[in-house]
Structures are given as C-alpha cells and as structure tokens.
Image: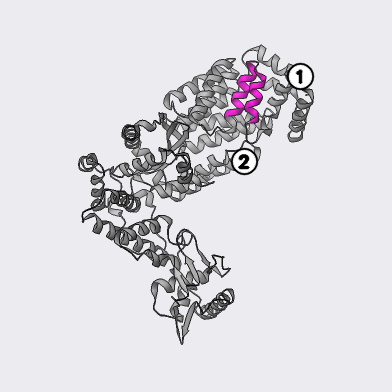
C-alpha cells in the first residue's frame, strides 16, 4: 500500500514514507466516500454529493479536483481513483483507510478499534453543516456507534476473562455518552460493580423530555436543529489531572481513579457522562471553554494533582461557580481502598448536587446560546486589560440578548464596569452606579445568586460603602462557600476595610480553591501584603502574574518602600504610558479606604515612586 487515508481524529493523506500529501481537502473527502460506498459510484451522483445545487458546475468541479489529486500523487504506482466510463472507484491496492483496519481481527481487537473510532470521531470538523456530505459524515458516525454497540452486546453475552471487562466498560461509556437512555447497554455496568445494578434498579429517571430521545439507528441527512443538551440529563465532564502520558511517567493513580469514577457515574440516570477520551482532550486543550461548549457540558469535575494530593472541584459551568471542592491524599500503599472511598465521596456529592440543581440546569439547557455567550465572557476576563474587559462585556450583553433575565450575565456586565473603573483610574462614578444597579437587578431575579451579591459588594466598595460591601460579600460567601471568586472579592473588601490580615487569609483560601491562580488573585494578595508592610512578599505575588502591567502602580509603591527607586520609576513610567492623565491626589480622593493610615501609606509610597 502506498498511501494511507486518515479519517479519524483528523483528515490527511500520507505517502509510504509517512509524508503528508498536499492534496485538496475535498479530494480526501471523495476518497473516504468511495471507500465506504464502493465498489463503484457514478460521476454524476458523486458530483452532486459534494457540489449540491450546482448541477452545471458540479461535473467540472469534480474533474478539476481529480486532476489536482493526481498531480499531488504523481509518484503513486497507480492512480488512487479508477475511472471506468461514467463511474469511479477507489483503488484499494494503492490506498488504505484507517476505517478499514478497525473492521478486521478477532472480536476483542475489533471492539478496541471501534472504541477508538467512536472516541476520535470520523471527520471531526466536517459534521456541523447541512450539506449532503456532512449528513453522510453524521451517518457514518452513527454506523460506527451501532457497530460498537453490536460488538459490545456480542462479547458481553459470552464468557469473559477479567481483563476484557475494562474494554467492555469503556465501550459502555462511549455508547452512553451518545445515548444515556440505552438501558440494555447500561445493564452491563453491573458486571463491573455489584452495587451499580442496585443503583440502576432503584434510581428513578429524571424527566428530561424522553419523547425526544435520539436513536442510534437514525441517519439524518441535514444537521439536527434540536439542542441535544435539552433532551438528555445534564452532562458532566470529569477532567483528569494530567494527560495519560504525563500520568504514566509520574506513576500517578489519579487518572485511573477518575476514569473508574466516570464509568461508575454512568450507572446514574441523573447525569450524562462525557467519555474519558473526550475529557482528556478537554484537559489538554488550550481552549477548554470551546470544547466544553461543543460537548454541551453543564458540570465539569476539575481535578489537579499536587504531589501526593488530589484536589477536586465541581464547577457549575453556566455560572462558573464551584459548588463543591475537596482535597484527597493519594497513598500508593492503599490504592484499592482509596479508589472506593474517593469514588464514593465524589460520586455521592456530584449526583446529589446535580439533583439539587436540576431545575437550574434545565433553565440553561433551554437557552444554550445565552449560556455559551456568558462562558465566552468569562473566558475573556482571564486577562485584566481594558480591551479584554470590554470584549467580555460584549459577550455578556450578547447573552442578555438571548435571555434578558439571565442573572449571571447581568452580574457579568456589572463586573466589567467596576473593572473598567479600576483600570481607568478616573473616578467615573457613573460606571459604579450602573454596576450597582445591574447587580441589584440580578438579585431581583434570583435571591440565591451568590455572584450577584459579589458584584453588588464590589461596586459598593468603590462607591465608598465599605461596611455594606463587606456585608454583601459575607452573604455571597455564605451562599457559595467554595466559590473562589467570591472569596477573592471578600478579601479585596477586607483590605479596604483596613483588615489586611483577614484579607490575606481569605485570599489564600481562595487560591487554595483555585490553584490555577488568576492574576486578580495575585494582585489582591499583593495588596493585602503591602498594607502588612510585607513589600517583598507583595512583589513576589505580582511577579507571578501572567500580565502584571495592570498592577504597576502597586509594584511602584512596593519598590519605592524598599528603596529601589529606579525600579519604582520604571513601573511609574508604564502607568503613565497607559494613563497619562493619572493624578495621585485625585486618585487617592476617590479610592475607598476606611482608615487614614492606609491612605497615608499609599501616598508616601507613590510619592517616593515619583507620582
């Protein structure tokens, strides 16, 4: 075989040396279509599949594409596509397709290959359109799923060696990820864990529009318009702490634990679980929010390993809120006992919290456009710059266009207004009044919305209502004790309330809950340290920021108090580049500080820095 056509996980053609062939993408699509629909296909039918609606130009486009393919594979021992009059066929002696390999071998080998095909996805980027080819791609995906299901049921019906069960359970997870209502497949989880069968029998299914249940045997030609998340239980993605390669290198049991837990959760009808392969893709991606959106994830169980400790937090994605968090010790001497104990603790909390928030999750699955626009806003706020803040505001307002009563989006707009007030340092009171009003509107819609109290507290802080701010943030923390961003804002208010020691303890608690440590956390910790006269410690926090330019004013103050005048002046110059109209006296006049000693310290340090 001279050429290999890859259709799973990517789309590419390689030669015998493994070098990428620079052929037109549509030519690769034609090769795959011929592979699956041979032995022969008429030119006319093939042309209309790939160029629908243009019958006059279709034949010309097909000829042009075939010519470009032949030029790209000029060194092939024979043509990749055989032309016989008005028909075309794939030359199987020259081209091998990765789909064909998975259909050979003993049943177990075929099961493993079938799991891989479903997980990696056939033409992953080609199924979202409404063209005939895209409809065919979706049809092949469902056929692959049906083949996996048939193999699973066949192998499960025969006596199995213990090592086969892991492959069967992976197949079960793959199928239930696509169709959580497949009870015949679900029953095979009981072979893994005797308690699972009791769960399956005892647990009453929640009402998630079962009449709209999709069938693995239906092959729609056009892209489905139905919101899949709205017809299934809330989707949960259990993100492993590391990629599988890193876990093996470190000898960590944490990834295996999370995969075991994923399989166990499939026994519950309360949730729809994303398969481990997909979860690992999300973990490795630089744009996790986009993948969570693509897979319609409502809850993410985020895990991070630090040495012999596993930190676990359950995040309700529509509100970006940590609803539960816990830290576990990993002891290699008692791995099996630990797996059971940790799985029971996590599974119990996940299923209970999902049930408690079922109506809230259902609201977001009804209006996914608002939810995803909100997520994009949250992602934009990962940087503390004026452009990123204003970009986030546009996304939050887009969410409100889809749902005017979306409390989290109202709170998000409020957040961007207060951040802009801080970054501009011009004392524009109207920004803060708008932020306060939006937070109150969000609270009117949901009295239990901790983020609304959080944004109310932040806006009130900068309006000089320090005691009211601390009270609002205390309420927010009581509503969501594991919500790290609430602890962050509470810490900031305590700094301004002249309680930097309590503020530092609070922000350290927030950083413990959010080990990724966003820049805002480090900035707040640095501010608390500054007012405790721990200038070196404050600078160490600032130096850990990904983009510390927004905190240059505080850095200048710290360097000045340490007698490092040149470094202080460099920071001062960057501040004035971004805000040439900055006036120290005016700025200090509207910064809310409860006690005079803090204002005096800031004035002294910034004057030494050259402001």
Q: CA distance from mark 2 to mark 1?
A: 34 Å
Q: Is residue 561 above or below residue 264?
A: above
Residue 15 x %, y %: 53, 69
Nearest to N terminus: mark 2 or mark 1: 2
Residue 176 x %, y %: 32, 51
Residue 412 x %, y %: 53, 36
Q: Is residue 69 above or below residue 404?
A: below
- As for residue 525 lying within the magenta part, the answer is yes
Q: Is residue 61 above or below residue 319?
A: below
Residue 418 is tagged as none
SS for dot 2 = helix
Residue 359 in view of the camera: yes
Q: Which residue is mark 2?
A: 388
Which residue is more in the foreground, 96 or 51? Answer: 96
Magenta-colored span:
521-543
Side (left or right) of 267 relative to 529: left
Residue 260 x %, y %: 34, 42
Disc 2 versus disc 1: nearer the observer? 1
* Residue in the image at 43% along x and 56% along y: 120
């Amino acid at each position: 075989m001279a050429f290999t056509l890859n259709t799973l996980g990517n789309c590419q053609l390689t030669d015998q040396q493994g070098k990428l062939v620079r052929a037109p993408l549509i030519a690769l699509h034609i090769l795959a279509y011929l592979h699956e629909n041979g032995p022969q296909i008429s030119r006319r039918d093939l042309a209309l599949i790939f160029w629908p609606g243009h019958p006059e130009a279709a034949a010309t486009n097909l000829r042009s594409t075939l010519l470009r393919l032949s030029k790209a594979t000029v060194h092939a021992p024979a043509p990749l596509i055989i032309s016989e009059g008005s028909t075309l066929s794939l030359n199987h002696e020259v081209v091998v397709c990765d789909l064909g390999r998975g259909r050979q071998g003993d049943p177990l080998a075929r099961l493993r290959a079938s799991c891989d095909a479903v997980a990696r996805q056939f033409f992953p980027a080609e199924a979202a359109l409404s063209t005939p080819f895209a409809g065919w791609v979706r049809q092949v995906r469902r056929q692959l799923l049906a083949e996996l299901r048939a193999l699973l049921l066949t192998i499960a019906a025969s006596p199995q060696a213990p090592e086969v069960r892991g492959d069967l359970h992976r197949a079960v997870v793959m199928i239930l990820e696509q169709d959580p209502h497949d009870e015949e497949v679900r029953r095979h989880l009981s072979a893994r864990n005797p308690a699972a069968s009791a769960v399956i029998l005892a647990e009453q299914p929640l009402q998630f529009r079962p009449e709209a249940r999709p069938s693995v045997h239906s092959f729609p030609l056009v892209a489905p318009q139905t919101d899949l998340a709205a017809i299934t239980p809330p989707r949960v993605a259990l993100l492993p702490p590391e990629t599988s390669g890193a876990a093996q290198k470190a000898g960590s049991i944490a990834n295996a634990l999370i995969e075991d837990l994923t399989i166990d959760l499939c026994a519950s009808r309360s949730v729809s679980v994303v398969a481990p392969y997909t979860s690992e893709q999300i973990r490795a991606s630089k744009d996790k929010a986009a993948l969570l959106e693509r897979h319609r994830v409502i809850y993410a169980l985020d895990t991070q390993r630090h040495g012999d400790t596993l930190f676990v937090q359950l995040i309700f994605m529509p509100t970006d809120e940590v609803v539960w968090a816990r830290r576990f010790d990993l002891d290699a001497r008692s791995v099996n006992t630990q797996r059971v104990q940790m799985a029971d603790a996590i599974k119990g909390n996940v299923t209970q919290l999902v049930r408690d928030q079922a109506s809230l999750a259902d609201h977001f699955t009804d209006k996914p456009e608002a939810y995803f626009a909100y997520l994009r806003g949250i992602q934009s706020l990962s940087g503390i710059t004026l452009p990123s803040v204003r970009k986030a505001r546009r996304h939050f307002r887009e969410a409100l266009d889809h749902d005017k009563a979306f409390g989290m989006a109202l709170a998000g707009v409020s957040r961007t207004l207060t951040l802009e007030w801080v970054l501009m340092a011009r004392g524009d009171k109207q920004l803060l009044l708008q932020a306060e009003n939006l937070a109150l509107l969000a609270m009117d819609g949901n009295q239990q919305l901790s983020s609304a109290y959080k944004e109310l507290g932040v806006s009130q802080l900068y309006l000089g209502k320090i005691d009211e701010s601390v009270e609002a943030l205390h309420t927010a923390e009581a509503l969501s004790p594991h919500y790290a961003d609430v602890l962050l804002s509470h810490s900031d208010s305590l700094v301004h309330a002249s309680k930097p020691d309590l503020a530092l303890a609070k922000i350290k608690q927030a950083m413990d809950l959010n080990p990724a440590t966003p820049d805002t956390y480090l900035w707040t910790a640095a501010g608390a340290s500054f007012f405790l006269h721990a200038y070196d410690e404050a600078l160490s926090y600032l130096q850990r920021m990904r983009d510390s330019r927004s905190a240059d004013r505080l850095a200048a103050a710290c360097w000045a108090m340490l007698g490092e005048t040149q470094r202080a002046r460099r920071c001062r110059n960057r501040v004035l580049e971004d805000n040439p109209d900055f006036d120290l006296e005016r700025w200090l006049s509207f910064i809310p500080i409860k006690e005079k000693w803090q204002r005096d310290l800031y004035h002294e340090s910034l004057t030494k820095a050259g402001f």
